[in-house]
Amino acid sequence: ETGVTQTPRHLVMGMTNKKSLKCEQHLGHNAMYWYKQSAKKPLELMFVYSLEERVENNSVPSRFSPECPNSSHLFLHLHTLQPEDSALYLCASSQAPGGVNTEAFFGQGTRLTVV
Amino acid sequence: GENVEQHPSTLSVQEGDSAVIKCTYSDSASNYFPWYKQELGKGPQLIIDIRSNVGEKKDQRIAVTLNKTAKHFSLHITETQPEDSAVYFCASSGYSTLTFGKGTMLLVSP
């Protein structure tokens, strides 16, 4: 148990569906992140939130829409995805978004398959 | 931005041997260097980290060394066991978020 919980663990969706990934952290951290992990590729940072404000958006397509309603919860809303979006989506949190306090704690991930 | 190179991409060792994974970084302002272990079907877990005011840190069978002049840091695992088999990621950060290496798949054969 890392203190970061992601649901669902597995998700299969069609290209016309709309779904959401949820992340919750119980560590009192101020920064939360979404990463994409594809086979044989490095971890790709998608979004960074600090104190509920988005501070980084790494050229992610608009079919991925993040939401951070409070410092403990982070969502990733998905719509009209493509098969190449199939990957493991990881949520993480840290005390701060930069500097020596960036020790990140990861959730177990959501394995997403787009059919 | 920061660039982190990690080698090797795959490492196979016999149980009991040592394993070394090396990373280099580009941003001289980086001051925090964690290592993560990712087992199959799980998220990455922090196993050890080092900050720039320290040259070496050890925790039982794992150790990390940092050479700030050369901008490289390494993970050392001694007396490897089959349960050490996993993908290991290095990372670095300075004033911005963590930048990860591409990972090393470590296979420990009994």
Image (cartoon, rainbow, N blue to C red):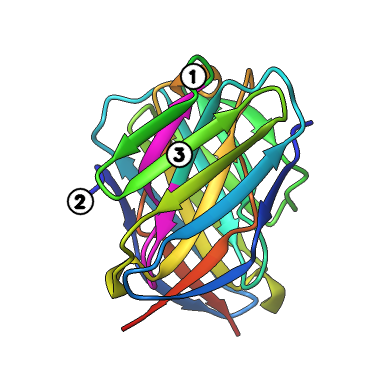
**Residue beneath disc 3:** B64
**Residue beneath disc 2:** A1
Q: Nearer the viewer, residue A41 or B104?
A: B104
Report the residue that reaches farthest toward the front.
Answer: B17
Task: Tell me where residue A16 sits by quadrant.
Answer: bottom right
Marks 2 & 1 on one chain: yes
Mark 3 residue type: Val
> Can see residue A103?
no
- What is the number of callouts on the image? 3
Chain ID of residue with mark 2? A
Label 2 and label 3: CA atoms lie apart by 24 Å
Give the dominant element type of the magenta stretch: helix, strand or loop.
Answer: strand
Assess whether mark 3 and mark 1 are in contact (beta carbons under 8 angstroms). Answer: no
Q: In the image, which residues are magenta? A: B36-51
Chain ID of residue with mark 3? B
Q: Residue at x 51, y 59 (%)?
A: A89
